[in-house]
Amino acid sequence: MKPGILFALLAVLLSPALGGGAGGAAAPPADAAIPAGTILWVGAHPDDEVLLAPLLGDLCVQRHHRCVLLVATRGEAGACRLRGGCHPDLATVRGAELRAAAAIYHAEVLQGTLPDLFAPDPPGIRRAWAAAVGGEGVLLDRLTRAIDGVAPRTLITFDPRHGSTCHDAHRAIGALALDAVKRLRAFAPAAFLLESRVRIAPGGTSIRFSAALPGDPRALRYDANTSFRHGPATAWSYLLTDAGRQPSQFDATFLSTLRAIPARQRNVYLLPAGLLGADPTPVDGCIP
């Protein structure tokens, strides 16, 4: 990490606590910790960026950062919520929806083809991904080269301890991305973990957003109630627009529930990846 970036990040982390406002507990602002330059999101599925959408909207659209979405799988194992079905297949539909969502942020898309699958645990998914491409070394090398090709100033991915929704593929891609960043020989990006914890009831009838580690003083918070002079009314609108462009995953029930999320829950939480340490312990009920 360059000295200028490190100084800016330390200034944010050591600054006096800000008022909690609609977000509850006080936390430094996440957007202030993101340096100017290319932002790379690394996720597992075509719709994962929705969880980060308010912050992406602010940084990529309002502040004109270059943004890239790297997605490991095509999401072919997910559910199809289109009434007429997903034709010719779910992966094709989700790929088109991802590109439509990326256009909101003027973002580039790097679409991976790792198998979308379920396994007993995140290491099981990583082993399956490695087997699909010819080994762990090949898997890690491919992701490292993809990140290096983007040359991001900032990389954001899932926290391997919980993956926001406890999805094993989220946790697996988070761990893989962090391992890839460690292998970068030249300039390594400032890496951040998504610390928003999202609990979704079957069918999207109930959704709750919170901090994965409530009260953790290291956490950075972005208030998605932030309003803009130009564009949508608030940053939360980017989440609604993104979800609306992916109807195979977010039907009318999902969208209605997202619109009804209370203002106090409309936050995006980040953690500088360097503060994670070597502790892989799952948090908040996620199965080891």
Image (cartoon, grey):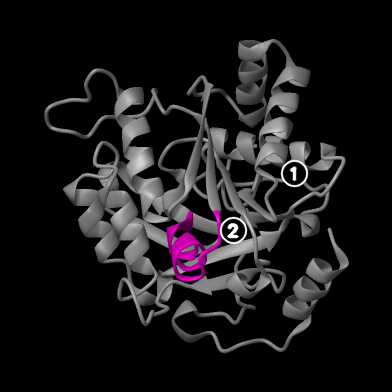
Task: Select label 2 or label 1 by which is in front.
Answer: 2
Q: Name the spot of residue 157 as percent of width and height, x first.
A: 61, 48
- Nearest to N terminus: mark 2 or mark 1: 2
Amino acid at the residue labelled 1: Pro
Quarter of the image holding residue 246? top left
**Vertical side of 66 occupied by 13: above or below:** below
Circle 1 SS class: loop
Q: Name the spot of residue 92 as percent of width and height, x first.
A: 33, 24
Q: Nearer the viewer, residue 10 or 185?
A: 185
User: Residue 84 bears which disc, if any?
Assistant: none
**Vertical side of 228 occupied by 64: above or below:** above
Circle 1 Cα neighbour tier, 10 Å, few/some/many (<14 / 14–19 / ≥20): few
Left or right, 208 with reference to 6: left
* Residue placed under numbered mark 1 in the picture: 280
Q: Nearer the viewer, residue 233 or 52?
A: 233
Residue at image position (37%, 40%) is 99
Q: Nearer the viewer, residue 1 or 38?
A: 38
Quarter of the image holding residue 230? bottom left
Left or right, 33 with reference to 96: right
Left or right, 92 with reference to 178: left
User: Residue 195 bears which disc, if any?
Assistant: 2
Residue at image position (83%, 74%) is 7
Quadrant placement of the N terminus: bottom right
* Magenta span of residues: 52-66
Q: Is residue 25 magenta?
A: no
